[in-house]
């Protein structure tokens, strides 16, 4: 039996509520065992595959999936294992990096708006405009007066997108400090993973508490009915994949995408 509706409501941040991450457990699996989860994940991925095909065919809905999380929280793994189940032709993925000189010459939403989904697309953001209230806030890359007004600007921007027909789903992949240490250590120890590790990651790690505070502010101020945040306990990769797949599938199902009628009358057409 699918437990998807439970996860979707259990992990969703109610608009207007104040998020305290210390009260949430990043190892929580909401009653799922790894064994049962693997069958449910397979079902979730098949639902996603089929829903995405219909969204693509119908060329009507626009879907934006935002992935945020501290370094090593599993954004890349979620893309590989969950987004990877869908047809890449209809799922453009954008990884937002340190802004280029050209990007910095514009407002912070300029590069983001350009990557939002068109009809039929499920666009996936690996990091997003939320970096402009996360790393930018923690590192004081702009003055407080500038970043502090961005929460309202982000809500207005997302409201514009949803008013114009985009469905937005935002996932915060929540790991704890010990889990990050283990994942960093694994990256150091495994020659095939070492490329992912940068010394700068350790400087960010030192700012853990500041990041927690910045994430709490973004989750508290920017979870809206139209563009909700979900906090995904992500210490266990298998649960993270299950929760993201199920919540996304549930969201897409509500759009009720359908294969379109053929554009022309095909009755009686014979292929010679
Ligand atoms: P990665 O996700 O490991 O490829 O790293 C991307 C890096 O880009 C991270 O260190 C982010 O903090 C950084 N980044 C992304 N967006 C911004 C932004 N708007 N301002 C500053 N740094 C950013
Ligand atoms: Mg990194």
Image: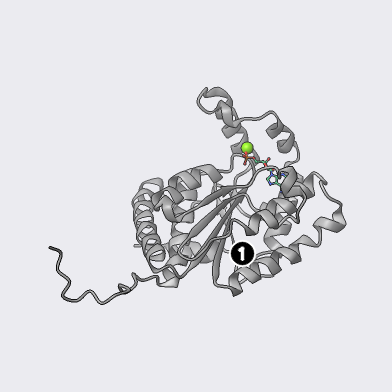
Residue occupying image coordinates x 73% and y 58%? 217
Mark 1 beta carbon near ligand 1 (under 8 Å) = no
Q: The C terminus lies in which quarter of the figure?
A: bottom left
Q: Residue at x 63, y 40 (%)?
A: 71
Q: Position of residue 168 (x, y in %)?
A: 56, 64
Query: Number of labelled discs?
Result: 1
Residue 36 placement (x, y as % from top left): 36, 51
Q: Nearer the viewer, residue 99 or 46?
A: 99
- Residue 166 visible in the displayed image: yes
Which quarter holds ligand 2? top right
On screen, 73 above or below 115?
above
Q: Is residue 127 left or right of residue 55?
A: right
Residue at numbered disc 1: 13
Where disc 1 sits, the SS reads loop
Question: What residue do we see at 75% from left, 54% from top?
Answer: 106
The image's colour scheme reads one colour
Q: Is residue 254 left or right of residue 20?
A: left
Q: Is residue 19 visible?
A: no
């Amino acid at each position: 039996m699918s437990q998807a509706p439970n996860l979707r409501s259990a992990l969703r941040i109610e608009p207007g509520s104040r998020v305290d991450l210390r009260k949430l457990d990043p190892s929580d699996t909401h009653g799922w065992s790894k064994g049962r989860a693997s069958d449910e994940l397979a079902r979730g991925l098949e639902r996603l595959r089929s829903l995405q095909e219909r969204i693509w065919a119908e060329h009507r809905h626009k879907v934006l999936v935002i992935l945020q999380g501290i370094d090593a929280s599993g954004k890349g793994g979620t893309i590989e294992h969950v987004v990877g189940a869908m047809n890449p032709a209809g799922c453009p993925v954008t990884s937002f990096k340190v802004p280029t000189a050209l990007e910095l010459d514009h407002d912070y939403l300029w590069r983001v708006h350009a990557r939002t989904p068109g009809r039929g697309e499920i666009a996936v953001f690996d990091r997003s405009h939320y970096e402009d209230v996360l790393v930018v806030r923690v590192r004081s890359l702009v003055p407080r007066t500038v970043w502090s007004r961005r929460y309202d600007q982000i809500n207005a921007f997302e409201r514009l997108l949803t008013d114009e027909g985009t469905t937005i789903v935002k996932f915060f992949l929540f790991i704890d400090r010990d889990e990050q240490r283990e994942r960093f250590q694994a990256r150091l120890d495994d020659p095939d993973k070492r490329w992912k590790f940068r010394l700068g990651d350790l400087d960010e790690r030192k700012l853990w508490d500041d990041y927690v505070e910045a994430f709490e502010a973004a989750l508290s101020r920017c979870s809206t009915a139209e563009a909700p945040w979900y906090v995904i306990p992500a210490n266990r990769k298998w649960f993270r994949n299950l929760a993201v797949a199920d919540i996304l599938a549930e969201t897409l199902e509500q759009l009720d995408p359908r294969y379109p009628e053929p554009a022309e009358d095909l009755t009686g057409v014979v292929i010679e």
